[in-house]
Amino acid sequence: MIDLKALRDDPARFKDGARKKNYDVDIDRILELDTLKRDLMTRAEALRAQQNKLAKESGPKIGQLMGKLKKAEPDERAAIEAEVESLKAAPNKLKNEIQVLNASIDDIAPELDELLMQVPLPPDPDVPVGASADDNVELKRWAPDDWDWNQSFEQNKGFAPKTHIELCKDLGLVDFPRAVKLAGARSYALTGDGMRLHQAILRYALDFMADKHGFAPMSVPVLVREEAMTGTGFFPAGREQAYHVEETTRGGGHDLYLTGTGEVGLMGLHQNEILDEDQLPLKYVTVSTCFRREAGAAGKDTAGLYRIHQFDKVEQVVICRADEQESRDWHKKMLGYVQELLQSLALPHRLLQCCTADLGVKNADMIDVECWMPGRGDTSPSLSSASSVPSEGGASSPPTSNASPTGAFGETHSASRLYDFQCRRLNMRARKGGEGAKGETTFCHSLNNTVAASPRLMIPILEMHQNPDGSVTVPEVLRGYMGGSESIG
């Protein structure tokens, strides 16, 4: 959620930010409702003050009048009694007026809150303006010394590459048909060395962040309440991507949602808490199963391991002080960890600056990391169905090609800088002065970045480290997690 005071002070900034992010939000209506709500609250507060004043003043006056009443002549009693009743009734009249105002405030609140939840965090000024992901800007590339970006895989390695789908089939790493039979399209079952490689990637990434970079390993729920999804900014804009468990329809206390990233659980741990600023930054890493409906992705990457409904991901989260430069510094550090990890796996990759239209509702800035995947990209029209993968309903996914694909980048990581957007929604604050201090509190800042998502990261590992004989060399840093195996196949 954005800072409402900041919106009042500079509505043009938020209108411009929404426009650059391609979000349609009625900022003027928010300001109108906010003005009306604040006016009603001011009037109600004034009446409460008047009510309290009357309550203090009327007591002694009523006491005096009751004393007079005992000594009053019959013709005076009626007037005194009427004055007493008037004094008693005045606070109740104000109370009724206050209740009417409060009811009007309550009527305004739902629409105002709903609109506020839709306002995106404005992008930072140095984020390039763009209309879609096609306008993202490449920042840098890295590749091992033996890789030439100007040559194809075949020119670099001396043989035509297989796609990860072909390698998985030939080496018995994934059983697609049985998984599709079990769970439908975009499903897979890792088998044998496929499962071992998957687990090796996750364990290496977790140890890499915990042992080398001092992140605290955490296990967090992946089935959470709606407040956690809303608080972390995945609702309302991303509601269609989440799997919904409707517990209330069968007697449960609240509905639950399967998370699409460990970020939700890590950030939700400190919801409604005041943290000690001296303990910041909090550096957390988790490995969790993630679930995404892939709504709107019909026909995109239907074969293989690239776009799937269930996967495992090592995620890093940092919660730091409310300082823009500190947030920017952490963003660079978190990207650096990922680049270091990918270099240790000898995977060519690039950093991609996301334009304003690709940031999403909650990010002030986002950098994607894309690995080179030789099996992606265009192929010749001559196709073979030998490696086609059955999908839901008995249909087959697009068959693979006999010709070598051109190769293409595929997103494997996404590093986000959110400032106080999530922490404001989660009501997560920090207080200066240490434990027990009574100083001013401020909303924290948060950042997140993928460390390794598998089995997607298996794609570049399998395709980049394949050999002419059809085997795959296991990256050296993963061998200890695979019983010392140097190759698969």
Image: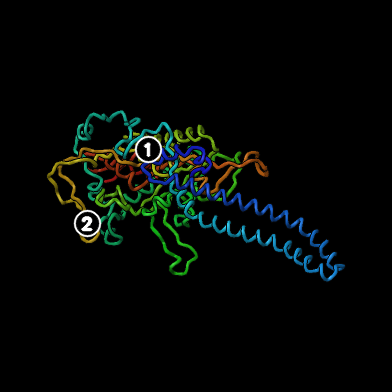
The quadrant where residue 339 appears: top left
Q: Position of residue 230 (x, y in %)?
A: 46, 52
Q: Residue at x 63, y 41 (%)?
A: 440
Q: Is residue 476 visible?
A: no
Q: Is residue 278 left or right of residue 254?
A: right
Q: Amino acid at mark 2?
A: Pro
Give the residue pinned by disc 1: 356
Vertical position of residue 234 compared to residue 6: above or below: below
Q: Residue at x 19, y 36 (%)?
A: 159
Q: Is residue 268 left or right of residue 195?
A: right
Q: Residue at x 34, y 47 (%)?
A: 197
Camera-side residue of 370 and 352: 352
Q: Residues within 10 Å of mark 2 (few under 14, many from 20)?
A: many
Residue extending farthest to the left is 382
Give the residue pinned by disc 2: 390
**Figure colour scheme:** rainbow
Vertical position of residue 280 compared to residue 259: above or below: above
| Dot placed on the residue nearer the N-terminal end, 2 or 1 | 1
Q: Is residue 148 left or right of residue 427?
A: left
Camera-side residue of 27 and 59: 59
Q: CA distance from mark 2 to mark 1?
A: 38 Å
Q: Residues within 10 Å of mark 1 (few under 14, many from 20)?
A: many
Q: Position of residue 68 (x, y in %)?
A: 85, 64
Q: Is residue 394 left or right of residue 452?
A: left
Q: Is residue 143 visible?
A: yes
Camera-side residue of 231 and 389: 231
Q: Are marks 2 and 1 in contact (CB under 8 Å)?
A: no
Q: Position of residue 436 (x, y in %)?
A: 68, 44
Q: Amino acid at mark 1?
A: Thr
